[in-house]
Image (spheres, coloured by chain):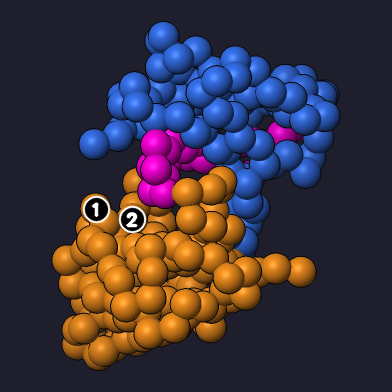
């Protein structure tokens, strides 16, 4: 069964910590995406990548960075976590130029 | 850039009745319109999609319609069942990037 795996379901971090959210896909997809999901705001795109070592800013990149050293892995980095980054984070992947995304189950991050 | 509006934000229907969720998009170049269902504690899952060269698509109890001229598309669920309770997202895309609506929370009442 093909899937997108996010390493943590729940995470609690302190303000100012550096946080890594990991995402791995086993479908050999070209494209990978990070979204955050907040009530009433839907899914907002943080960063995306169309290839290894390539990254593009989405709609809300401030406070985040990403890393894609291997095709199957896309990491989201919170350089210095803040309470307004408390959210559900969703990773997705898709084949190049093709159809809909496959999402992971999400990581619910709480910054205290 | 593309903007997708989705209505209503919350919808309650009696079990067995139909549910309709409507979306509009802003960029006439968009050519792919997927719908996602998100159950509690899970990521969104693709349930149906439609391309701009098609006006309607059906898969069992769910159907999607597209009006390119008006830039409207809709999701129709017939004979609703308790397992249809979820959050539904519409989306639009013209390339590899998909823009999502804000979601509709669908409640199926017993």
Mark 2 vs 1, N-terminal side: 2
Verify whether residue A4 appears in magenta.
no
Which chain is rendered orange in the image? A
The mark found on residue B58 in the picture is none
Verify whether residue B93 appears in magenta.
yes
Location of residue B33 with respect to B74 vertically, above or below: below
Q: Residue at x 59, y 29 (%)?
A: B50
Q: Residue at x 52, y 58 (%)?
A: A94
Q: Residue at x 46, y 25 (%)?
A: B23
Hey, which quadrant is residue B109 in on the image?
top right
Q: Quadrant of the image for the N terminus of chain B?
A: top left
Location of residue A95 with respect to B30 vertically, above or below: below
Residue A39 visible in the shown view = no
Nearest the viewer among B69 and B42 is B69
Chain B, colour shown:
blue
Location of residue A32 with respect to B45 vertically, above or below: below
Q: Residue at x 74, y 24 (%)?
A: B58
Mark 1, secondary structure of its residue: loop
Q: Quadrant of the image for the C terminus of chain B?
A: top right
Q: CA distance from mark 2 to mark 1?
A: 5 Å
Hey, which quadrant is residue A80 in on the image?
bottom left
Q: Which residues are magenta?
A: B86-110
Which residue is under mark 1? A59
Task: Pinpoint the chain carrying mark 2.
Answer: A
Going by the image, does A5 lie left or right of A45? right
Task: Pinpoint the chain carrying mark 1.
Answer: A
Which residue is under mark 2? A45
């Amino acid at each position: 069964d093909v899937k997108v795996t996010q390493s943590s379901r729940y995470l609690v971090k302190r303000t100012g910590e550096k946080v890594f959210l990991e995402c791995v896909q086993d479908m050999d997809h070209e494209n990978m995406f990070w979204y955050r999901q907040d009530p009433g705001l839907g899914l907002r795109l943080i960063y995306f990548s169309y290839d290894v070592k390539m990254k593009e800013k989405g709609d809300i990149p401030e406070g985040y960075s990403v890393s894609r050293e291997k095709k199957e892995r896309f990491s989201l980095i919170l350089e210095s976590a803040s309470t307004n980054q408390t959210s559900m984070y969703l990773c997705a992947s898709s084949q190049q130029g093709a159809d809909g995304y496959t999402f992971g189950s999400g990581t619910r991050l709480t910054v205290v | 850039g593309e903007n997708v509006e989705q209505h209503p934000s919350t919808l309650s229907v009696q079990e067995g009745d139909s549910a309709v969720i409507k979306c509009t998009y802003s960029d006439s170049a968009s050519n792919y319109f997927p719908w996602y269902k998100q159950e509690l504690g899970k990521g969104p899952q693709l349930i149906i999609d439609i391309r701009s060269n098609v006006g309607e698509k059906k898969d069992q109890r769910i159907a999607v319609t597209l009006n390119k001229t008006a830039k409207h598309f809709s999701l129709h669920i017939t004979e609703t069942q308790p397992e249809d309770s979820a959050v539904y997202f519409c989306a639009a895309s013209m390339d590899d990037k998909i823009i999502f609506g804000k979601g509709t929370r669908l409640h199926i009442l017993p």
